[in-house]
Image (spheres, rainbow, N blue to C red):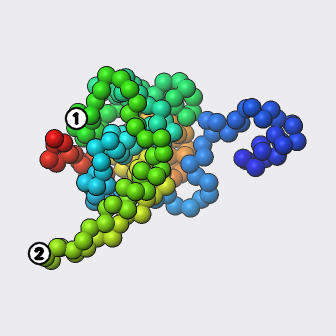
Amino acid sequence: MKTLFRFAQAKRYFPKDINAMEGIENEFEDDSEIEIFTPEELRRLFASARAELIPYLAIAAFAGLRAAELVRLDWSDVKADYIELKKGKAKTRSRRLIPIQPNLAAWLAHYRQKSGPVTQFANMSKQLLWLAENTAAEGKEDGTPAKPALTWKHNGLRHSFITYRMAIANDENIVASESGNSPDMIYRHYRQLITPEQAKAWFSIVPTPAPA
C-alpha cells in the first residue's frame, strides 16, 4: 500500500505534503509471527537499564504505547490511574485512555514529574539496542552460568504487552481499546499465544529493590 501511495505522489495524482499512511496499521509488514519478551528477559532489561530509560521501558511493557506515542508523551498525560493519549499524540489520531496496571504504578512512582517529556533521548532505537547488548552477564565462581546478550525485538515491548494483556482480559475489544488497534487485529495476531500464568508473571514484575 505504501508503494502505491508513493507512486501516486510521484505521478502527481496525490499531494506530496499529505501522509496517506498516517493512522493506518503498519505494525505487521507481513504475516510473520510477532516476537515478544519473556518475563525473565524483561527483568534483565530493567536490571541493565539506566534510570533515564526506566519510564520508557515500563510504559511500553505495561501500557503498550507505540514508540512514536512514547516519544511525544508528556508527564502531564500520565495520571494517577491512567495514561491519556490526546488527539494528535496518539498514532491513530483518536484520544485513548490506557489504565495504569498496579506494577506500572510501582515503576513510575519514583520517576513521576508534573510535566515534561517522559523520554529524554532523541534516538530511542540506539538506546534500546545498547540496552540489549548490556544484558550480557559473565559466569560467576558460584557456578552461575554466563548469559549472552539479549537481541532487541522490533516492537517487542508493545507486542508483549498486548499478548500478555490479551491472555488476562480474554477480550479483544478491551485490549484493542487500550492499545489503539482494531479488535480484528488483536484477535488475529495475539489470541492464545501464551498462558494466563505467564501473563500474571509479566504483570507481577515490580522494582526490587525499589529505586533509590
Secondary structure of residue under mark 1: loop
Image side of residue 83 versus residue 147, left or right: right
Image side of residue 161 versus residue 86, left or right: left
Say if 111 sits above or below 143 in the image. above
- Residue at 28%, 39% in the rendered image: 104
Say if 128 sits above or below 60 in the image. below
Residue 142's disc number: 2
Name the kind of residue labelled 1 in the image: His
Residue 110's disc number: 1
Q: Residue 43: give x, y in percent of width and height.
A: 27, 55
Q: Residue 151: give x, y in percent of width and height.
A: 42, 63
In the picture as drawn, the residue positioned furthest to the left comes out as 142
Q: Residue 61: give x, y in percent of width and height.
A: 36, 46
Q: CA distance from mark 2 to mark 1?
A: 33 Å
Q: Nearer the viewer, residue 63 or 55?
A: 55
Name the kind of residue labelled 2 in the image: Asp
- Residue at 28%, 55% in the rendered image: 48
Q: Mark 1 packing: few (<14 Cα in 10 Å), some, or many (20+)? A: few
- Residue at 38%, 59% in the rendered image: 132
